[in-house]
Amino acid sequence: MKFLGELDPASLSRTQRCNRRLSDPSRLQAIRDTGLMDTPQEEAFDRLARLAAQLLDVPLTIMSLVDANRQFFKADFGLPSPFRETRTLPIDASLCRYTLEGESIISSNAPADPFLKLHPSTGPWGIVALIVLPLINPDGHVLGTFCCIQPSVREWTPQDLTVMKELTASIMTEINLRDQVRKLKAEQNMRDAFVAALTHDLRTPLTASKLGVQLLGRRHADVPGVQASVSRVTASLDRAEQMIQNLLDASRIQAGKPMALEMRDCDLHAVTAQTLDELAAVYPGRFVLTAEGDFKLRADVLGLRRIVENLASNAVKYGAPGTPIEVQLDRDETQVMLQVRNQGTPIAAEELQSIFEPFHRTRSATESAAKGWGLGLALVRGLAESHGGKATVTSCAEKGTCFTITLPLDAAAGRRLSA
């Protein structure tokens, strides 16, 4: 960059330091990570440029990104032609490149400034008074600038500087929030890929193990104790397979996808009663089922079983020992309702908002002896919503904790409406 004269030592030192920053690979990567270079104008940034122009009463404001080769105008108010159309400026003509050390450029009269008067862009752009503030990301890299320009001498007030600094901070807040969203999406994609690969790789040896155990059971059926051992190992393998399925389903829920369902005509009363009978073998005398009327609906039977299993077993694990678990079915013309209520220490109000989130465990669950991944209630909600229904919870010391699942009688229709 050739200035129109010899710079004083301080100005020359500044240009040299900034020139070294110009091609810094880390800084250039930070600019690429924003995803803003060579993109169309956006209201989120143009709004701030307009606001700066109105509050400071200036004809020109610009938000720029500065890479190694050019200055890109992402947002502006009053940008003249041909820059309004091209939205770029060669780096050799850029004044903003001299903020790359994090220093601002502020002047009330550029033609009288020992540094600015020698810059070849000052005259052609009609730059007299200006404020140029660097856009600095959390890692300390200068991505570009936010500036206001006036073609006449003007003494900037502290209020003017405050306005520009606050709007610059707002621009960086927008950029940083977008960066966090990008990172979260990348993390989610990586987690989903990891879960998918892990569960696929785990299912193959589990299937082989189950087949091997069943084969041994048949070959040595006459040996005392073999069938009992086979049953225990098979049950453990089944539980491991169910945990894998839970991981897959939780991954789908986090990705905002509906769970895979196989719809058919069924009876919620019969499904609930059978599921509770099976659980009663492990938790005898705990469940009280109340249901009056017809509870036939179109739904996924396995999904209904998983809802009842998760809610009923959680009620036993975290409810008051020895107290009954009340399971109640109700219905109206369009939907059925399943409620599972237990007594005991209520769930804290602040935890009720996030209790259905994947991998969330309440404080009482974490402190209890019961182990888990915090997937059960997420799956319950995911299954309910995939049926076109919903899952809610209330909890207080007087009435206990009650989980309520509401499902449409025709889950296929409800699912279409909620899609």
Image (cartoon, rainbow, N blue to C red):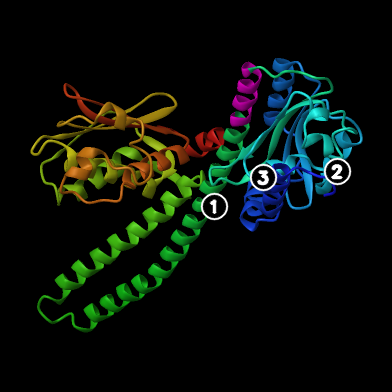
Q: Position of residue 163 (x, y in %)?
A: 63, 21
Highlighted magenta segment, given as a residue range: 158-169
Q: Is residue 168 magenta?
A: yes
Which amino acid lies under the numbered mark 2 shown in the image of this protein? Gly
Mark 1 packing: few (<14 Cα in 10 Å), some, or many (20+)?
few
Residue at position x 28%, y 42% in the image: 361
| Any part of residue 259 in sight | no
Report the predominant secondary structure element of the magenta stretch: helix
Tell me the quarter of the image containing the C terminus: top right
Residue 100 is marked as 3
Image disc number at residue 353: none
Confirm or deny contact between disc 3 and disc 2 (CB under 8 A): no
Placement of 381 over or under 17, stated as above or below:
above
Q: Which of 71 and 359 lies nearest the eye of the viewer?
A: 71
**C-alpha separation, residue under disc 1 versus residue under disc 2:** 49 Å
Q: Could you tell which of marks 1 and 2 lies nearer the N-terminus?
A: 2
Q: Which residue is mark 2?
A: 5
Sequence-first tag of 1 and 3: 3
Coordinates of residue 241 in the picture (x, y in percent) = 34, 62
Crowding near pointer 3: few (<14 within 10 Å), some, many (20+)? many
Q: Is residue 155 magenta?
A: no
**Labels 3 and 2: the sequence-earlier one:** 2
Q: Nearer the viewer, mark 1 or mark 2?
A: 2
